[in-house]
Amino acid sequence: MENTVIEKIMLGKNLKASAKFGDNLIEGAICLDVLENPDVRRLAYEYNGKYYLNVKVVKRKEPNSFGKTHYLEIDKFVPATVTPVE
């Protein structure tokens, strides 16, 4: 896989603790359109016949103006021992 510098790719910006379960459950939505990006597709890989895309749930330094405390980011790490999806 070619080493390309890819900026941070946000998959979901507005995640927060659940009103019912608190910090035990982080809720939000992801943007499926991001998955069509060719840079993102190069980060997907196959392992044991299934397809994966690594993600990170990141806690914000402080909640935004809407009370959102976390965001979902695509992890750019792809294990060397798997087959990239092209």
Image (tube, grey):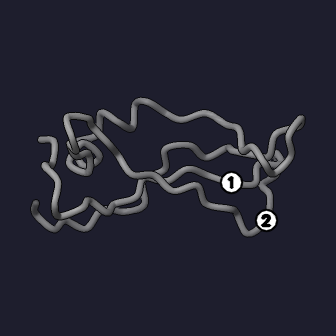
Q: Which sits in the foreground, 59 or 7?
A: 59
Classify mark 1: residues with Cα within 10 Å, few (<14), some (14-19) or many (20+).
many
Q: Which residue is mark 2?
A: 62
- Label 2 and label 1: CA atoms lie apart by 9 Å
User: Type of residue at label 1?
Assistant: His
At 45% across and 52% down in the image, what residue appears?
55
At numbered mark 1, what does the secondary structure look like: helix, strand or loop?
strand
Looking at the rendered image, the quarter that the N terminus falls into is bottom left
Q: Which residue is mark 1?
A: 70
User: Type of residue at label 2?
Assistant: Glu
At numbered mark 2, what does the secondary structure look like: helix, strand or loop?
loop
Q: Which mark is residue 33?
A: none
Whole-percent x, y for residue 56 in the image:
51, 56
Q: Please, is residue 77 above or below residue 25 in the view?
A: below
Q: Which sits in the foreground, 30 or 53?
A: 53
Q: Please, is residue 28 above or below residue 39 in the view?
A: above
Whole-percent x, y for residue 74 in the image:
42, 52
